[in-house]
Amino acid sequence: MILSASVRRLLAALTGLTLLLLYLPLAVVVLNSFNTSKSLTWPPPGLTFDWWERAFHSAGARDAVGTSVEVALTATAIALVLGTLMSLALQRHDFFGKSSVNLLVILPIALPGIVTGIALNNAFRGILSLQLSIMTVIVAHATFCIVTVFNNVQARLRRMGSNFEEASADLGAGLWTTFRLVTFPQLRSALLAGGLLAFALSFDEIIVTTFTAGAGVNTLPIWILDNLFRPNQAPVVNVVAVVLILLSVVPIWIAQKISGDIDNLR
Amino acid sequence: MSVDTARAAVPETRRTAARRVSSSLSARPRARLALLLAAPLTWLVLVYVVALAALLVSALWTVDSFTGEINRSLTFDNLKEIATESLYRTVTLRTVGVAVLVTVVDVAIALPIAFYMAKLASQRMQRILVIAVLTPLWASYLVKAFAWRSVLSDGGIFQWAASRIGLDTPGYGLTAVVITQAYIWLPYVILPIFAGLERVPNSLLDASGDLGASTWQTMRTIVLPMLTPAIIAGSIFSFSLTLGDYITVNIVGGANQMLGNLVYTNVGAANNLPLAAAIALIPIVIMIGYLTAVRRTGALENL
């Protein structure tokens, strides 16, 4: 299709505008982390490093990061196993009720977080009489993280077809050997991308977490929400946010480096 | 490819127990399927389906207003209340309205940038753009909502900029909720649409141009129909995520309530889980309706 130069320019301009829109609020966060005004007025009356110093000495923020990493890592590990099994089942087999199972995987993310949240809260406390703890958060997070792994692995399985697996079986490899030496190496980058997304999803989740975290389990989003409206803490939250934005480049860079495949980052 | 290593690593067939299990499984695809499905399906059913079903049942319970205890005899009182009270209708309409607006805004913004990324940008540029669109996804949701709170505040940057052209900040309210939610979910809409556009072969677009179609005609008759599943996939995110949100509303929505707020208040302050469950049915029904309606378009494979 031949696009006229003016249409091209228009699309490029819109792209630039959209990026500006995406980054402007983040830039405001970065600037506000140096803003001397606690009410974050614009333009900033002065700049200071105080908040950065306070943030580095905030035990609450540090602990919250630790808790979030623990939850996200465990939930991601569970999601990786369950999501891979599920995608192998759905992509390599045909069976009755397949589309319902497919829907079931998507449901925890497609239904609003508050529904998942109160449903699990009710199930944990009402039905199972469990104390809410860090475990309940992990179970909840793993449940909605399955879908990101599932989607990535399924897309990869669909693309790679089953020729290599059949060849491996014809050459006498057992199921496990075929998985270990043929299927898994081809899935590795898809697993990495799905795992990264699952980690990110869990790390940033607030609504389901609110309903499934026990007292004293402060993930980073819960800590942020607690401190957002405290006048003395809001700038510290800004600092934490800036650090998160900077750190977020790392996993994206890894994913790009390893997979080299943009499709997998969805 | 790893076929060479596979051959090297499997020198000969030994009749171990694992080997016997493996070969008997190769002959039985059903058993293989059952093994694969057992763990994930058990997890999803035990954790999720049971919880969801229990929630649906508890919507039929009531709470004694004096003791605060749950009465487990089944009645349709909660559902009746939701169907008849105008509060719920108003809030539902408001919530769906906001969710639709957010989705429309997001798709409108996503289409041009996704098209540029998929079809016009050089490979290098495309990579950079994908990273640029992805990065804000990793910034905390709360921080982004809070960023808009400070952008839209009295004395904030929006007012500062808008005052130069004689406008004012919309302040905290539904407009702010739409802006903030559209901002937060935008990358989730751009990425599936971008991936969808990547799957539209360039040769098809060239053919359409060669056969005399204008740019607009090509977009409308070739690109758009092929892109519909991707657009729907993107809309599932923005629509569903907005439908259940109550935190953005608290941060930038002023006094407005959405469905999520009603559910939250009833679980927490009002201690009325049954009513909360009944209210939660509204977004569940809407979402399931939406998902069932779009399932045939293949959108769910594009998530």
Image (cartoon, helix red, strand yellow):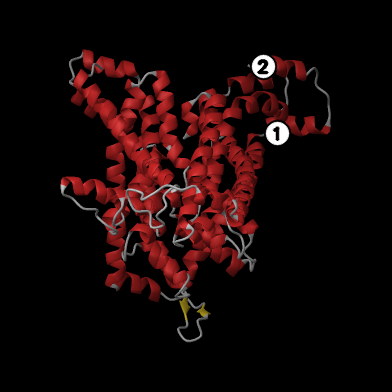
Hey, what amino acid is under mark 2? Val
Q: Chain of mark 1?
A: B
Can see residue A178? yes
The answer to whether A208 appears left or right of B16 in the picture is left
- Is A89 in front, or is B66? B66
Q: Residue A209 at x, y = what percent? A: 54, 57
Q: Is residue A53 above or below residue B108?
A: below
Residue shown at 26% from the left, 25% from the top:
B222
| Placement of the C terminus of chain B among the 4 image quadrants | top left
Tag 2 secondary structure: helix
Q: Which residue is the site of mark 1?
A: B25
The quarter of the picture where residue B207 lies is: top left
Q: Amino acid at mark 1?
A: Leu
Instruction: Kindly identify which residue carries mark 2.
Output: B3
Q: For mark 1, give the secondary structure.
A: helix
The answer to whether the residues at label 1 and label 2 have Cβ atoms under 8 Å apart is no
Give the left or right position of residue A79, taking residue B132 as reference.
right
B76 or B154, nearer to the observer: B154
- Relative placement, left or right, of B176 versus B56 is left
Question: Between marks 1 and 2, how big is the CA–CA gap?
Answer: 22 Å
Q: Position of residue A87 (x, y in %)?
A: 56, 37
User: What residue appears at the point 42 percent right and 66 percent down from the top-left corner?
Assistant: B263
Residue A225 rendering spot, x and y as whole percentages: 48, 58
Identify the mark nearer the N-term, 1 or 2. 2
**Marks 1 and 2 belong to one chain:** yes
Image coordinates for residue B77, horizontal then vertical, percent:
39, 76
**Given the current orientation, which residue lies at the most extreme left position?**
B166
Residue at image position (31%, 28%) is B115
